[in-house]
């Protein structure tokens, strides 16, 4: 069906744009636009970006100077072929899409999956103000954006991918203002942000002045309704002590004090409940009131990071009473992408485990997701 319209569209678009102001600017310009609109109707549901270049009359009304048309589909090629149309040069102002050394007025390209650019070339421009009209159709995929980059003004102007955008520019006495490669339209597809699930990143408990302080840290708690502090005498049967309201931050730290602890050994854990009723538990921590705070801390379990900030050459996990077996460490960026993966076999107990990322990691904040042999997952924020 598409090839049925290819030849008329190419010939008529080339003719109307190249001659839009050669005889009578107002009449030809309006006729060109109406004809082009009619010709586009067979492709009403296809992805496309049309650019019309307008000039201004003294009364601020506009006329068509030139223009281009790009259409995207999976069965088109990015190479120049019979589906594309070369620019027919006219004696007035000209603008085209340049690919290599070829000037095009119509280009059909593959559907954009990552990034693409329309490189414009303009010449014979006059010292006055012009207007770009960009008409995007069905290109507003999730994560995709379009910007017109102006090398002369060093600006980037957003272009709507499923509507009409107007951008004015001026040619003046500065030679850079009428540089042929002044403008380009850049498309970028950013990965969608992947929500990182809520997790307890650490929990600690220790005696102080005949009381017990419990501290815990969280990640991605924006859907959490409450935290419940629970205590047990045997580490199996827990009872509720108190509740704490979450701050609903991306990461946060909490502290609660048990003013009436048992006289011997107790176990503590934190229970979270989210908006949908899902319950998560932190690691349980053990507190022995008959020994010092330092000894209690040694008796707790968990994984901490050292140092932080870290580098790929100096990244260590402090393993505290951890099970033996295979551990997996994933480096996750702010888009939820795994940028590096490391695995190691641990003998169990207490030790400092060096982590090798295996590649260079750009500077920024990452989530270190550690999967333990039991399947339990722990997340630590790390700054590179």
Image (tube, rainbow, N blue to C red):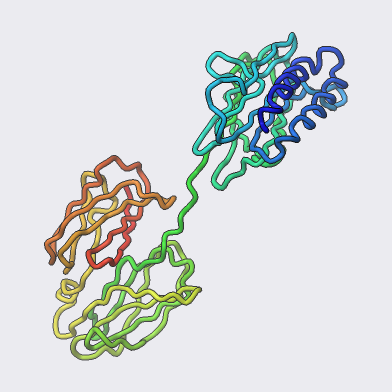
At horizontal 73% and vertical 19% (from top left) the residue drawn is: 11
Report which quarter residue 57 is drawn in. Answer: top right
Percent coordinates x, y for residue 151 in the rendering? 57, 24
In the picture as drawn, the residue positioned furthest to the top comes out as: 91
Q: Between residues 63 and 46, which one lies in front from this camera angle? A: 46
In this image, 97 relative to 163: left or right? Answer: left
Q: Between residues 268 and 72, which one lies in front from this camera angle? A: 72
Up/down of 98 relative to 208, above or below: above
Percent coordinates x, y for residue 301 in the rendering? 21, 71
Report which quarter residue 118 is drawn in. Answer: top right
In this image, 23 relative to 211: left or right? Answer: right
Percent coordinates x, y for residue 223 in the rendering? 48, 69
Up/down of 223 relative to 32, above or below: below
Report which quarter residue 318 is drawn in. Answer: bottom left
Percent coordinates x, y for residue 122 in the rendering? 65, 17
In this image, 182 relative to 229: left or right? Answer: right
At horizontal 29% and vertical 71% (from top left) the residue drawn is: 203
Up/down of 360 relative to 256, above or below: above
At horizontal 21% and vertical 51% (from top left) the residue drawn is: 355
At horizontal 28% and vertical 49% (from top left) the residue drawn is: 341
């Amino acid at each position: 069906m598409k090839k049925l319209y290819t030849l008329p569209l190419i010939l008529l678009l080339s003719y109307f744009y190249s001659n839009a102001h050669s005889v009578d600017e107002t009449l030809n310009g309006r006729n060109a636009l109406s004809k082009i609109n009619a010709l586009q109707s067979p492709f009403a549901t296809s992805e496309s970006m049309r650019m019309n270049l307008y000039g201004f009359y003294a009364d601020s009304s506009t006329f068509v100077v030139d223009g281009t048309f790009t259409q995207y589909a999976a069965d088109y090629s990015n190479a120049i072929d019979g589906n594309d149309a070369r620019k027919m040069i006219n004696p007035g102002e000209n603008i085209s899409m340049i690919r290599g050394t070829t000037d095009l007025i119509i280009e059909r390209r593959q559907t954009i999956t990552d990034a693409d650019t329309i490189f414009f070339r303009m010449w014979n421009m006059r010292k006055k103000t012009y207007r770009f009209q960009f008409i995007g159709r069905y290109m507003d995929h999730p994560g995709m954006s379009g910007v017109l980059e102006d090398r002369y003004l060093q600006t980037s102007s957003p272009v709507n991918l499923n509507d009409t955008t107007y951008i004015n520019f001026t040619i003046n006495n500065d030679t850079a203002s009428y540089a042929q490669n002044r403008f380009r339209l850049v498309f970028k597809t950013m990965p969608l942000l992947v929500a990182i699930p809520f997790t307890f990143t650490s929990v600690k408990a220790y005696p102080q002045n005949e009381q017990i302080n419990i501290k815990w840290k969280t990640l991605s708690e924006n859907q959490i309704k409450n935290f419940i502090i629970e205590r047990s005498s045997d580490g199996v049967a827990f009872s509720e002590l108190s509740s704490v309201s979450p701050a609903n931050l991306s990461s946060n730290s909490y502290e609660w004090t048990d003013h009436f602890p048992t006289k011997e050994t107790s176990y503590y854990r934190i229970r979270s409940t989210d908006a949908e009723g899902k319950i998560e538990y932190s690691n349980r921590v053990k507190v022995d009131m008959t020994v010092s705070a330092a000894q209690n801390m040694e008796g707790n379990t968990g994984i901490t990071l050292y140092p932080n900030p870290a580098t790929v050459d100096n990244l260590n996990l402090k393993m505290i009473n951890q099970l033996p077996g295979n551990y997996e460490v994933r480096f996750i960026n702010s888009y939820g992408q795994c940028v590096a993966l490391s695995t190691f076999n641990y003998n169990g107990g207490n030790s400092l485990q060096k982590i090798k990322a295996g590649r260079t990691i750009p500077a920024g904040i990452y989530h270190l997701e550690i999967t333990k042999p039991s399947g339990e997952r722990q997340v630590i924020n790390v700054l590179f």
